[in-house]
């Protein structure tokens, strides 16, 4: 997969801009707060259907503007394709190859990205929600149907929680209705659980390889899925979740919410057999996140047959020379990588940079293009 062109109009601090990218490494450089991360945000939007910063449409509007649009041209599945998103007068318009799409879900799965930015250290250092979000996003890029499964799960969860809050307050609730929601929740939880475990098995293999490479063979990375239930098949997992909901019902009524299920599960990350979160050094934690992100790209390649586009936001400046060289020269071989940095001078000819663009106040000026 290769990003060919990005077009923006009234997006963040960009009035109008068009960037034509090259294969291999593309460098966006400039001082802070000039718009480098905004570009990555607009690109990644087409992989996820929303901002990785959690911004809404109104926050991505240019100053004093009431509409914005972003579009990309890319090569995937053996042909050139386009995606467009426009927000105007409170309405959203999505297009693929000029054809109107009816929902965010229809946009997903066509253009795939892996993004790595400094806040991703929370994948190791943060709580379970950070790791669940990583799994949900990564899986949905490979298997777009996963999103609809998770949306259905959340709907059942919301309804079940509503009944549990009634019970907590001593108000009347229909126990048969609670059983229906519990069964539906268990069924969707079983499917999501299986998706996550299967994906994690693929991710574990690739992440362990990258961790060993980055650390010079000194560190072994292992990943395992943490759940309150066991089972190898969907049917076994449904029964296990149903049993758990039944056994813990009084506890959940007291809490007024569902305390168990895939919305509470986690990933255990170990380095050389010990917790990366509790005992890993900052360097080990950074290497772990790098390994997970590179592995995410390899799993995407294994499932779809094409590497995703890699977006690295001001990451290399925080790496030592060994890790930096590995990303640029070994892990990055055969992939399209778009990097942001404050300094262009730190990238040498040997780094295989094919395009350098200076970013300043929302304007983009190519300063070097390898021909």
Image (cartoon, helix red, strand yellow):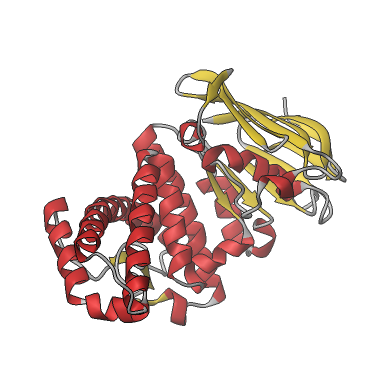
Is residue 233 positioned above or below 337 on the image? below
Residue at (32, 79) in percent of width and height: 170
Q: As drawn, is 40 to the left or to the right of 214?
A: right
Height in image: 102 above or below 137? above
Asked whether 53 or 210 is in front, the reply is 53
207 vs 311, left or right, is: left
Query: Is residue 98 at least partly visible in the picture?
Result: yes
Q: Report the side of 87 relative to 13 (left or right).
A: left
Where does the image place residue 249, in percent across and percent down from the top left? 23, 75
Q: Residue 184: x and y, percent?
A: 24, 53
Q: In which quarter of the image is residue 24?
A: top right
Residue at the limit of the structure toward the front, as seen here: 172
Viewer-side residue, 97 vs 221:
97
Q: Position of residue 190 (x, y in %)?
A: 23, 55
| 135 up-or-down from 339: above or below | below
Q: Residue at x 64, y 29 (%)?
A: 72
- The one nearer the camera, 154 or 323, is 154
Judge whether 78 appears above or below 298 on screen.
above
What's the residue at 50%, 18% (across, down)? Answer: 79
Name the residue nearer the viewer: 35 or 215. Answer: 35
Position of 245 with respect to 46 (left or right) is left
Q: Where is residue 127 in the image (x, y as percent from the top left)?
A: 47, 72
């Amino acid at each position: 997969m290769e990003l060919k062109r990005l077009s923006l109009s009234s997006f963040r601090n960009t009035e109008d801009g068009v960037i034509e990218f090259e294969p291999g490494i593309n460098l966006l450089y400039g001082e802070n707060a000039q718009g480098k991360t905004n570009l990555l945000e607009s690109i990644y939007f087409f992989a996820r259907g929303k901002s990785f910063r959690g911004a809404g449409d109104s926050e991505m509007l240019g100053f004093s503007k009431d509409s914005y649009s972003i579009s990309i041209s890319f090569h995937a599945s053996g042909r050139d394709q386009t995606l467009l998103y426009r927000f105007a007068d409170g309405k959203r318009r999505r297009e693929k190859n000029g054809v109107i799409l009816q929902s965010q879900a229809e946009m997903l799965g066509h253009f795939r990205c892996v993004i790595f930015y400094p806040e991703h250290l929370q994948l190791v250092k943060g709580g379970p929600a950070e790791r669940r979000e990583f799994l949900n996003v990564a899986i949905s890029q490979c298997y777009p149907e996963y999103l609809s499964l998770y949306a259905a799960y959340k709907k059942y969860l919301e309804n079940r929680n509503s009944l549990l809050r009634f019970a907590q307050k001593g108000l009347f609730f229909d126990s048969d209705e609670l059983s229906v929601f519990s069964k539906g929740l268990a069924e969707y939880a079983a499917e999501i659980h299986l998706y996550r475990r299967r994906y994690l098995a693929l991710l574990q293999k690739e992440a362990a390889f990258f961790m060993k490479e980055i650390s010079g063979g000194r560190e072994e990375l292992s990943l395992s899925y943490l759940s309150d239930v066991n089972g190898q098949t969907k049917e076994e997992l449904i029964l296990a979740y149903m049993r758990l909901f039944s056994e813990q019902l009084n506890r959940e009524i007291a809490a007024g919410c569902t305390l168990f299920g895939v919305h509470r599960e986690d990933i255990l990350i170990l380095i050389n057999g010990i917790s990366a979160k509790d005992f890993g050094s900052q360097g080990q934690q950074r290497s772990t996140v790098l390994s997970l992100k590179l592995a995410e790209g390899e799993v995407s390649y294994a499932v779809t047959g094409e590497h995703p586009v890699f977006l690295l936001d001001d990451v290399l400046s925080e790496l030592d020379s060994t890790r930096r060289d590995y990303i640029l020269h070994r892990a990055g071989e055969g992939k399209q990588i778009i990097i942001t940095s404050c300094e262009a001078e730190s990238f040498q000819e040997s780094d295989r940079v094919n395009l350098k663009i200076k970013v300043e106040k929302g304007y983009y000026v190519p300063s070097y293009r390898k021909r």
